[in-house]
Image (cartoon, helix red, strand yellow):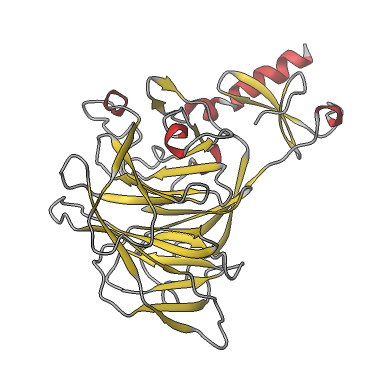
Amino acid sequence: MKRLLIICGLVLAGMSVLAAPKLVYNGDTLEWNNSWQKRQCGTLDIEKNIIEVSGIACSRVTPGYIWMQSDETVKYIIATTEKGDERACKVNFTKNIRWDWEDMSGGVYNDVNYLFIGAFGDNDETDGEYSVVYFEEPAIDPVNAPEVTVTPNRIKYVYPDGKKHNNEALMYDNLTSEIYIITKVYYDVCQVFRLPFRLDYGDEVQTLEYICDLGVKSDLGSGSKPYKGFHLVTAADISPDGKYILIKNHNNIVATYCWVLYWERQEGESVADAVKRQPQPIRAYNTYEWQGEAICWLDDDTFYTTSDADDGNPPIYKFTRKWGAGVEDITYEQENKLVMIGNVLYVRTDKGLYSLDGRKVQ
């Protein structure tokens, strides 16, 4: 009887979990990925750093710092720590480059670390001049070199359909040296495109390769609720070893319809094939982040997000993977808690989330 009362109480307590919206994606209602925990690690001081951050990338040359770029009129990037309270480095450019920068990624090519910036924002789809800006990542030395200047390169491109598109997401695959670009569409399907990275493109205009749609139109709802589907993609990143993929959106109409989608890449699988599979929405992100337009991996077990908020100092969030003990280490005499996710009961311990028969839930 006591067990029944506990479960009934948990069912009632879990109603808020059940009430949280789920994403319908390619015809399936996706289950949450519960393997991450979130905390605010810092607050970006925009007076000391940069405003309207729309892209971030963890430094690989000088670990411990995060590069940030703006989609405002400032034509430079900065580096700060995860606390966001001090500017460690400012990078200026020797050339004027097409503006409206919307995302940033880091990557390695021929053993050299590069930073890639998507100069491809086009809200009204009237510009048509799109490019990926890249340059060797400079070292960060806050004391001796708080400001440096670099000469950027750029790869100009067009879309295979010959149309103009708005974009806010870029990611780079270290395993195949490929750039992936994702369009941002309001209340419609966002598309994924691919561009092999090379140093010898010069001024030649490249044509992207279409990969797939993210979700389908029928998932976007109808009538007064067109915000339910996965659209408005604003950022993406691939982990340094190429194993994990993140793609996020934002929705400032209804905050709960914001997701970070997560894919674990299978051995030998391309990014293109991975993102055609069903993803998992990360439960820890399912919260409000005004103009959330930036995401980046630190390593396989850690990633950051921050926002494009221009009305204050936005928080910097750190997400860490929750690794649990083995099945043999689980005992129900510990201070464990039953939790309900969907219509299934689980055991949550300080080492992770487990099914009632002791299997770790990934």
Point out the residue furthest to the left here. Answer: 126
Q: Horizontally, is 87 left or right of 349 in the view?
A: left
One can see residue 252 in this view? no
Q: Quadrant of residue 98?
A: bottom left
Q: Residue at x 23, y 25 (%)?
A: 222
Picture quarter with the N terminus: top right
Q: Give the image location of residue 195, x and y in percent.
A: 35, 48
Picture quarter with the C terminus: top right
Q: Horizontally, is 4 left or right of 63 in the view?
A: right
Q: Is residue 132 above or below residue 273?
A: below
Q: Horizontally, is 169 left or right of 144 in the view?
A: left
User: Tag count in the figure?
Assistant: 0
Q: Give the image location of residue 75, x and y in percent.
A: 31, 74
Point out the residue furthest to the front here. Answer: 200
One can see residue 354 in this view? yes
Q: Nearer the viewer, residue 214 or 9?
A: 214
Point out the residue furthest to the bottom here. Answer: 144
Q: Is residue 339 above or below residue 305?
A: above
Q: Residue at x 76, y 18 (%)?
A: 357
Q: Residue at x 31, y 64 (%)?
A: 154
